[in-house]
């Protein structure tokens, strides 16, 4: 919608409240609410707020911020009670008091990097697959079912939850491709149809909120925590991505035996070369590295293939007439990352590959999980960082990550992640008490 269409819609549909959404640097959704009487002023000038308490935003002596709603993101919130006042939402761009973009705004970070791609003639499209768990509460990971991958039985108690979630998303204009039960008990997946990256980052935040809201209506809890249970698969967010030039997929080449253009090959090579550096952004929590371990289908080995799902990057097979579907699937991110920053880093890694024409190594069509260490060394297959600490070390030395995030977000994120690691490493866990207390 345009600004004028939003104002007309709110009058016609008697919208009473509008929630203004944005995220902090960690991708945690933030919001404040205005009444419809404030809408015109908000759309034209933005709404002031105190940014000093938002993670990664301003210090207290420079805390004045402006949230400027993006009218194209306006939607009514259908999960609100039907008998109450109509509530809508819009995503906001965060501005300085003088109206310039705030460098700590993750949405601005993505916009800035998409402009770099546009200057090279590209539009960036992504399609994420977000996995998550349903539990009985947020206190313990108590499962709802014992179903497995693609199960269609009474074991899957979340069929109605997924159905209502999809209906809510589609009512909000977010297209869904399919949904299913995942590998682990009580684990599920709803896949969004690909879209331009900024729209998809907004949709990803909306998706996470809708999944949780619908679960709450059913009296259960949904979590995007990467690894909430020991001994089963964690939750990932495989990100399908491609570059377009106008209406043409720049990744497709009918003359290549793999139907991949040089642009696609250089892009994938960029993802592989910079994978260690960007892992802090795509897997940003201590818990993320409980998922990124061998043995649970997590893509920890830096390699690519056309069919092999044990590699970090997979290129789905080309189907005749489906040129626009040619894409690379980057499989290490998890659904608890900040999508604005994660999409930015994957894009810039790929663009570096294109700019510098990185050579693409040979595809690995063997099962990388089942290889011996010697075989992996022979094929020069390296691994992603094994802990948040390792990921911080790689990211902190990365010019690519710093350039992508900008100095403000880069410094604030490093500071935040070092504090998180320090708290984790000094914590005495239940495992340590149970293992060592009886014998030491």
Image (cartoon, rainbow, N blue to C red):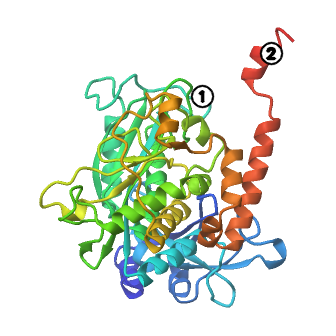
Q: Are marks 1 and 2 in contact (CB under 8 Å)?
A: no
Q: Residues within 10 Å of mark 1 (few under 14, many from 20)?
A: few
In the picture, the disc for residue 140 is 1
Residue 163 location, x and y as percent? 30, 43
Q: Quadrant of the N terminus?
A: bottom left
Residue 303 location, x and y as percent? 44, 46
Q: Residue at x 39, y 30 (%)?
A: 183
- Which secondary structure, mark 2? helix
Q: Residue at x 80, y 15 (%)?
A: 436
Residue 188 vertical position relative to residue 71 in the rendered view, above or below: above
Residue 284 vertical position relative to residue 311 in the rendered view, above or below: below
The CA distance from mark 1 to mark 2 is 24 Å
Residue 177 appears in the rendering: yes
In this image, 192 relative to 231: left or right? left
Residue 191 vertical position relative to residue 230 in the rendered view, above or below: below
Q: Nearer the viewer, mark 1 or mark 2?
A: 2
Residue 127 picture quarter: bottom left
Q: Residues within 10 Å of mark 2 (few under 14, many from 20)?
A: few
In this image, 268 relative to 231: left or right? left
Foreground residue among 420 and 371 = 371
Residue 98 picture quarter: bottom right
In the picture, the disc for residue 436 is 2
Residue 189 picture quarter: top left
Residue 59 location, x and y as percent? 80, 71
């Amino acid at each position: 919608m345009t600004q004028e269409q939003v104002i007309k819609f709110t009058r016609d549909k008697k919208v009473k409240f509008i929630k203004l959404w944005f995220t902090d640097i960690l991708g945690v959704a933030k919001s404040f609410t205005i009444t419809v009487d404030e809408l015109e002023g908000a759309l034209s000038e933005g709404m002031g707020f105190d940014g000093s308490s938002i993670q990664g935003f301003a210090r207290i002596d420079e805390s004045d911020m402006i949230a400027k709603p993006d009218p194209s993101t306006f939607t009514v919130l259908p999960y609100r009670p039907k008998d109450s006042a109509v509530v809508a939402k819009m995503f906001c761009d965060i501005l300085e008091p003088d109206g310039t973009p705030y460098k700590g705004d993750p949405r601005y970070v993505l916009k800035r990097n998409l402009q770099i791609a546009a200057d090279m003639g590209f539009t960036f499209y992504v399609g994420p697959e977000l996995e998550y768990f349903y539990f009985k509460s947020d206190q313990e990971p108590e499962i709802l079912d014992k179903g497995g991958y693609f199960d269609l039985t009474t074991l899957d108690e979340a069929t109605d939850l997924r159905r209502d979630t999809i209906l809510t998303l589609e009512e909000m204009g977010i297209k869904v491709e399919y949904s299913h039960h995942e590998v682990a008990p009580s684990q599920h997946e709803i896949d969004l149809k690909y879209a331009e990256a900024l729209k998809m980052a907004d949709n990803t935040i909306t998706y996470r909120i809708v999944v949780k809201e619908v679960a709450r209506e059913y009296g259960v809890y949904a979590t995007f925590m990467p690894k909430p249970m020991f001994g089963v698969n964690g939750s990932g967010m495989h990100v399908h991505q491609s570059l377009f030039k106008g209406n043409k997929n720049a990744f497709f080449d009918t003359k290549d035996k793999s139907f991949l253009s040089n642009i696609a090959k250089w892009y994938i090579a960029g993802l592989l070369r910079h994978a260690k550096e960007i892992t802090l952004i795509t897997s940003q929590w201590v818990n993320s590295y409980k998922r990124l371990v061998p043995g649970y289908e997590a893509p920890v080995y830096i390699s690519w293939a056309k069919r092999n799902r044990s590699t970090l990057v997979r290129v789905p097979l080309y189907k005749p007439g489906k040129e626009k579907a040619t894409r690379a699937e980057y499989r290490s991110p998890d659904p608890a990352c900040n999508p604005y920053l994660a999409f930015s880093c994957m894009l810039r890694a790929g663009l570096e590959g294109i700019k510098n024409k990185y050579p693409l190594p040979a595809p690995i069509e063997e099962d990388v999980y089942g290889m011996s260490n010697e075989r992996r060394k022979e094929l020069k297959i390296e691994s992603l960082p094994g802990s948040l600490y390792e990921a911080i070390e790689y990211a902190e030395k990365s010019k690519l990550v710093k350039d992508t995030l900008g100095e403000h977000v880069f410094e604030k994120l490093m500071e935040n992640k070092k504090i998180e690691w320090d708290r984790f490493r000094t914590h005495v866990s239940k495992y340590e008490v149970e293992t060592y207390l009886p014998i030491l």
